[in-house]
Structure formats: structure tokens, C-alpha cells
Image: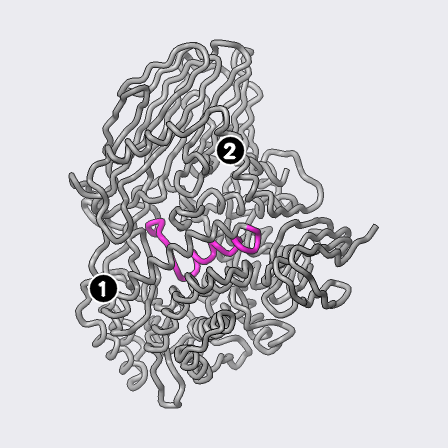
Amino acid sequence: MSHELWFTTAAPDWFEALPLGNGHLGAKVFGRVGEERIALNLDDVWSGDGPRTLTVTDGPQALADVRRLLLDERDQLAATERTRALQGPLVESYQPLADLLIRTAGEPQELEDYRRSLDLRTGTAAVEYTVDGVRFRRETYVSTPDQVMVWTITADRPGSIDLDLELTSQHPIRAEAADGTYGVVGHAPSDLTIEYRQSPDPIRYEEGRGIGFGVALQVHNAGGTAVVSEAGVSVRGADSLTVLLSAASTFAGWKVPPGRDPLVALREATDVFGNVSLEKVRERHVDDHTALYERAELQFGESRDLPTDERIRAVAAGGTDPDLVALTFNFGRYLLMASSRPGTQAANLQGIWNQDRRPMWASDWTNNINTQMNYWPADLTGLGECFDPLTDLIEGLAESGAETARILYDAPGWVSHHNADIWRATWPVGEGGDDPVWAMCATCGVWLTAHLMEHYRFQLDLEFLRNRAYPLIAGAAEFVLAMLVEDQDGRLQFIPSTAPEHHFVLPSGDKASVDLTSTYDIWLIRELFANLLEAEAALDLGSDLAARARQARERLPEIGTTPDGRLLEWPTDWQPSETDHRHQSHLYGLYPGAEIDPTRTPEWAAAAGASLELRTKGATNGGWTAAWLVALWARLLEPEKASAVIQDYLSRLVSDNLLHRDGAIFQIDANFGMTGCIPELLIQSHTDTIRLLPALPADWPDGSFRGLRARGGLVFDVSWRGGVLVAASVVAAQSGTYRIALPSGERTVSLEVGQKMDLVRTA
């Protein structure tokens, strides 16, 4: 059952409710019968009232001071403190929208044969049960073509459906009812204090400020009656019922304040219903969904027809379930489809699902790995369209970040730091009150541009490269070149620099985080300049910018190692504050970068392996860290270590519905990360040789994958039995000659556009 999650009980809480979405409208379905709850989100409903102004007045002077403190005085502690002067406002927070409550009229009855499920192939959540001899079926989905959520209920005895429907919200709302449509209007908070800051009044609503929203609901009953009022909708004696729900906001773009009248949003939501065909809405949804979902899949051994929660508990008890790993992979693809579609906001820390007005870390875009990890599966697993919102986000950050670069650093180009929100904040956040280790990461935009080049490598879309990716890569390079300063040895240093979220300990015992160029930043800058040169070669350009980048790349600090053979994390072999720290930033060159490889750079690979052994020794990994570790071990060709991480992840770090959960914290990056990293054990294309089954774990003896992509526009289908490759085929999107490493040896193949070639075929 690697394409279905199913259970024999309703979800006990929001975490375990089943997620649905179309990138814009998100829903979590609990599956309760007496009072069903469907928790709703809209991707552009956030706190705040428009873009904020960066009020830092002495940015260039603060930068000069930090450079002096590091280059001349070697005072990392003072330099760390001085960067507080560069901090701007805190980010705003992603918000819940509303809840749809569906109450069964009458006295509660005993349920029989209850089954709750999520069909990944069709993008539908279902609940089936029997009450007093009547079999009911409920189905919910969120349609991309029609931009509605659809909820249906049928019964095998006519006249058996008696329900009351109501919309509620954590925000102040007002009900509206007209022309057979019921809805609510409201506002998100105009001002909100982020969850980790104390405030006597953390959530504030001011009339006429904040993003407004409207949620509209329309019912279509067969048989019986349906009465619509401002109290909701009351249905009695129906044979079947279809509920359409739509939502809209007054968000008008990140550069302007939102619209002031939420009734406009309600009218926009209501107008959607006029374009919905009840006869075709499900078919249109399924056709759209399957067109993406069926592009790729992963299968390991035989499927197990057991409830998903029972399978997870069995793994936690020490069992193995390769098919559960396949389900994890397939579920991650489903989640990306549900939370990131062309024209929507990019998937944030929680995708598009959030139940709190003050969510952890604002449910923002955290750009020192989390946003990037969300999109690791996109191109690799055939979901290139789902990448579009990330490009949109980066373009907004570049426009906003050009002003931030000017104000803070008097630099050209653009910059983005640790955190971003819907208003495209690009500065270090904290208002001077946050530890710079959480804010002072000026190469986050550089990392984001790496995704643009990777997208081109998979898709080979020259128009995308020319019109969207190249300007952003060039702008990031302009910024970095302006920020590089010469040290006493003639090396070019990027200052200020950090290893994200990780302190080092000075001989005095003090913790600091800002220093000369960290290994993480060296990898990123080397890659940025290489990407710029590659892009210009593909576009037949030869700019002065690229020439300067080529020269500067040769003068960057070298990648250093410690006396015991590990990669340095900082330019000095400082004592790390946490040897088991969750960020593996100094290993960026191994993954997601491509400079470290066991066959091409064995010395670096050995140093990366030693670093990874220290980092994971005795560590209890978090969810997104676990995903990263899978890819790192895979790139080092250590399949059993990667498999052990996956086993641990499924044992400790997921809810019964496979969403990552760490206590009361939900972050979706782990789900996306696992889906992007598991394939690294099966196919690698980051070098000039494509490797098939490069690191196959022993506990996946039988399996197959279909539709996994390689850089260069190649699509592979592969099967193996008893750990031996038995079938492999490839289709090319572009004519060319390719080197492919099979377990039996390497071969070179020439392919024409659209040609399918069998590489291995065992009878």
C-alpha cells in the first residue's frame, strides 16, 4: 500500500489529520463523524499590514567595524556583537484561516467498520463507516483546476443524511448569507509578536489593517432540504450532499498594503462557484492530480495492507518495512503537489498547513536550509511545475534584497538573510535583540540561486535560464563580489560570515558566531561563481562580471581540514558549541553541492566522512537533519548508514500520518527532504557520470523506481531483485552522449530526443 495512508480511527489531533491542498487552499481532514473538523489555510493569509521599512541607519559603518574587528583585531566576540546593528524587524507569521465544522444531527450512534484514508494517486481523503445499518462514505479533495475544496457524503439508504455546517475561526469573523451561499469574512492580525518573543499583547487586530479574507460555502443536496442562514447550513433528509468551499484574501502583492474590505475577498470566493461543474469537478481534479503524481514512483518489495499507524509502531519496535519507506517517498511528492503549484506562494516551514496564530518560527521561509530542502524533490521526481513558486519567491527576495544590500552594505546586487515572510523581508531579523547566530547569514540568497541552476540542469529550459535564473544568479554574484575584501595573505574574505545557527567557543569560553569566511560560505561562493560561468556559457555570453567572478574564485580561502582529518567549519579550528549540531553546513560541498565526491576528490570525501562521523556520534537526529544525513551518507556511498537514519526517522520522528513531528512541533521540510534524499541511494547525477544503484541498502533487496530524473534531461526506470539490477531504461529530453555507471560497469550511450534505450534487460 505504498500509495495510500489508512487508519481505523479518526485523527486525535490536528497533527494527525490528513492534509489536502492545491498550493493556495490547504485543508487538514480529521475524519470525525459526530463533529467533523476540516482545518483550513490560505497561502497568502499572514499577519502584518504590508511591507516594512528597514530603518538601520549605520549599516555601512557597522560593516566596516566588523571587518576591522576580524581582519585587524581578530576579535570574533566583538564582531559578533557589532552585527546586531544590522538587524531589522522580525518576520510576520503565517496564519490559520478557518475551520469547517460538520455536525451530525441527533444523538451519537455507535460506529462500525470505520476506515479513514488518503489516496495519494487521486489526492482524495475518504471516511467510510456504518451507523445503524447504513453505510456512509465521505470524500474530500481540493481542486487545482476549479480552485475549490469539495466535500461529499453518500449513504446507501435514501434520506439518511442530517447535518449542520458552520465556519469558525480563531480570528474575528462575521457571517454572511445570501443567494444560497453561506460564508464568513474576517481579518488576520495587523500586528503580531513572533512566538519566541514575550509580549503582554502578542496578537493584535486593528480595524482597517491586516490581510482580510472571505470563506464561502455552497451546498448541493440530492433529496431532503438545505436551509442557509448566517448561522450556517442545515441539511435534513438528504440522499447525498456535495459541499463546495472557496476562499480568497485581500493580499495584493508583497510590495503594497492589502485591500481593506474583506467583502471583496468573499465575493471573489463566491464567484468561483459559478465556474464549477458538479458533474466534472472530481474528474478534472483527478486528471490534474494524476498527470503530476504518476510521473514517478518508488516500490520496495511487497506492499503491506495494514493501517499506517500500525506499520509505524512496528518499525519503532525494531521491525523493517521497506514498503513504508516507499510510502514516505511517495507521500512527500504528494505533499509538494498539494502545497506548491504555479501561481501560489512557495511551500513554507509547514507547507500550507498551520493551526496556530503564533506558529513555531513564524511558519516562515527559513532560508539557511529549510526552504531549500522543501524543493529538493521537485525536479528529481518529475515535479518541475511545483518549482515555479520558489522562483517567484526568489525574484521577490531579489527585488527587496537589492534595497537591503544598499542600506546595510552599500553594495550592488541583492542579498537575502536567514528569514523571509510574505512581505519579502531580506534583512537579518531581530531588531538588535537576537543572537546573530539566528540572523547573520548573508549568503542565503546565494544558496537559493543554486536551485535555479539545478532546475535548468534538469529541465534544459534556455528561456528559463535566460529570463529568470541568470539575472538572479548575476545579481547574487554582484553582491558577493562587492562584499569580498582582501586579508593580510591576499585571500578574499566574505565578511561577516557564519556557520548557520552554530556557535564556536573561544579560548575565553565565550560563544561567538561571526568570523572570517566559513567553510559553508566558501562552498556557496565557489558554486555561485561556477554557476555564473556555466550559465553564461549556455547563453553564449561573456560578461565582465563573469571574468571578475572567475578571478575571485581563485583567490577565495582554501577548504581547510583539522589535524585529525575533518573539514574545518570555521577558518580556525574552533571548538564547536555542539559537536552533534543539527546543521551540516560545512558539508554543503558534499550535498546538496557537488564538489566533494569519493571518486573525484577522495581527500575531501574522507574529511567529510570524518566530520560526519563526529557530528552523528551519539546524536539524536531531528527530522530535517535526518533527511540531510541520508543524502550525505548516500553521496559517500555508505548505504547502510543512510538506511539506519531512515529507520530511526520512521521510528521516532513522524506522526501516525507520516508527517514529521517533534513533540508539539510540525515542520514539513523533513518530509520533502526525505523524498529528495532517498533517491540519492538509487540514482546520482551530480558528476559527469550518472550512477544507477550507487548505494543500495541491503534491506531493500527487491524494488523498482519509475520516472526519476537525472541532470541533462534524462528519465530512468530501474528494477532490481535480490540486490541485482535486472532492468534499466532511459529516455532523453535532449540529444547527447552520456556516461552511465551500472553496478556491472560504466558505459557511454548516445541518445536522440525522445529515444528510449534499454540499458539492462534480464528475462
* 73 inside magenta stretch: no
Residue at (28% x, 81% y) in the render: 69
Q: Secondary structure at mark 1?
A: loop
**Is residue 732 shown above or below 112?**
below
Quick one: 147 or 624, which is closer to the camera?
147
Q: Earlier in the sequence, mark 1 or mark 2?
A: 2
Q: Is residue 747 visible?
A: yes
Tell me residue 324's x, y (percent).
62, 44
> Looking at numbered disc 1 in the image, what kind of residue is underneath it?
Gly
The residue positioned farthest toward the left in the image shown: 207
**Is residue 72 shown above or below 632?**
below
Quick one: 497 or 572, which is closer to the camera?
497
Q: Is residue 527 visible?
A: no
Disc 2 target residue: 284
Q: Quadrant of residue 263?
A: top left
Cα–Cα gap, marks 1 and 2: 51 Å
**Is residue 553 shown above or below 741?**
below
Disc 1 target residue: 432
Residue at (25% x, 26% y) in the render: 175
Q: Secondary structure at mark 2?
A: helix
> Looking at numbered disc 2 in the image, what kind of residue is underneath it?
Arg
Tell me residue 566's x, y (percent).
53, 75
Residue range (magenta): 361-382
163 relative position to 137: left or right: left
* 376 inside magenta stretch: yes
Residue at (57% x, 76% y) in the render: 604
Q: How many marks?
A: 2
493 relative position to 655: left or right: left
